[in-house]
Amino acid sequence: MADTAVVFDETGLDTWSDEERFEVTRERIAEYAAATNDPIPAHLKGDVAPPVFAIVPVFEAMMMPVIDVAPMSIFGRVVHGEQDFHFHRPIRPGDKLVSRAKAIGFEGKENGTTITILIECRSEDGELVNEQYLTAFFRNIDVGKQVGDAAPAHRFDAALAEQPPLATASAHVDDDQTFRYSPASGDPVPLHLDEQVAKDAGLPGIIAHGLCTMAMSSWGVLTEVAGADVARLRRFAVRFSKLVFPGDDLETQIWKVGSKNGVTTYAFRTVRGDDVVLGDGTAEIAD
């Protein structure tokens, strides 16, 4: 039964966080690519960042606005619900990036409440590099109303699954994946690193980072339908559907949806057997 006694603070919406600064190095890009089993040579050499590397420069800024809206007492119930990247250009070594974030809305439902965070990442001279929408989901909390804006939609048409996918890409989550991904991404959450902490939280053991799984799906999509060229990627969005564990074998399934104004939209999902672990996948790729 959802807790309806929790109140979110509407005055915390639309307030930008303090700016966070990050200098991109070739070594950090290469470390991230290796930590996500990325096979694309330009990523592994650090020449250009993989798409989901975009989370690294904004990591410190992205969750701060949640504290402005949700009470600290319920933070144990928060999970990463969705992530939606909108790319204006790739990140490259030598970039000096400035990031900020703000909560733009929340919505209560019977099974939980979402808070939508908008993140901006710019170059030092003000050029917009990417925008990101992060949806945080508070399990079993229903604030009873909708306020502000939600993230742009990216729903998977179930009818697509009745057709064979255009392409598929396989990935394996290594036993040491989380221990490599954590320093590469800057994510220190112990659920990914400490077996006992994970079990105390009711999990069977260490879980993989959702964004690591998303990164694996991104190189799958890039290699299969974008010529392994990250500069063509305009949007990449997923919903985190199920937990992923070290040792899992994953498959990203890709369908073409249509083309408009020189950009082709693909729908995708990442599965572990019959389980969808990343749902509602959308990738927009310049032709």
Image (tube, rainbow, N blue to C red):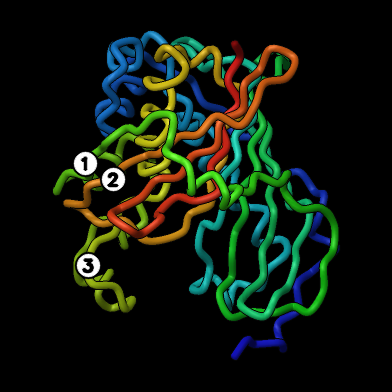
Q: Is residue 237 visible?
A: yes
Distance from label 3 to label 1 (Cα)?
Answer: 18 Å
Q: Earlier in the sequence, mark 3 or mark 1?
A: 1
Picture layout, residue 112 above or below residue 82? below
- The amino acid type of the residue labelled 3 equals Gly
Q: Are marks 3 and 1 in contact (CB under 8 Å)?
A: no
Quadrant of the image occupied by residue 72 = bottom right
The circle on residue 205 is 3
Quadrant of the image occupied by residue 235 = top right
Where's residue 284, x and y in %? 60, 26
- The amino acid type of the residue labelled 1 equals His
Q: Earlier in the sequence, mark 2 or mark 3?
A: 3
User: In the image, is 12 to the left or to the right of 168?
Assistant: right
| 248 and 138: which is toward the camera | 248
Residue designated by label 1? 172
Q: Earlier in the sequence, mark 2 or mark 1?
A: 1
- The amino acid type of the residue labelled 2 equals Leu
Q: What residue sits 56% from the left and 48% below the top?
A: 280
| Disc 3 crowd, CA 10 A, few/some/many (<14, 14-19, 20+) | some
Q: Are marks 2 and 1 in contact (CB under 8 Å)?
A: yes
Where's residue 10, x and y in %? 83, 65
Picture layout, residue 123 above or below residue 139? above
Distance from label 2 to label 3 (Cα)?
Answer: 18 Å
| 283 and 80: which is toward the camera | 283
Question: Which quadrant does the C terminus fall into?
Answer: top right
Residue designated by label 2? 250
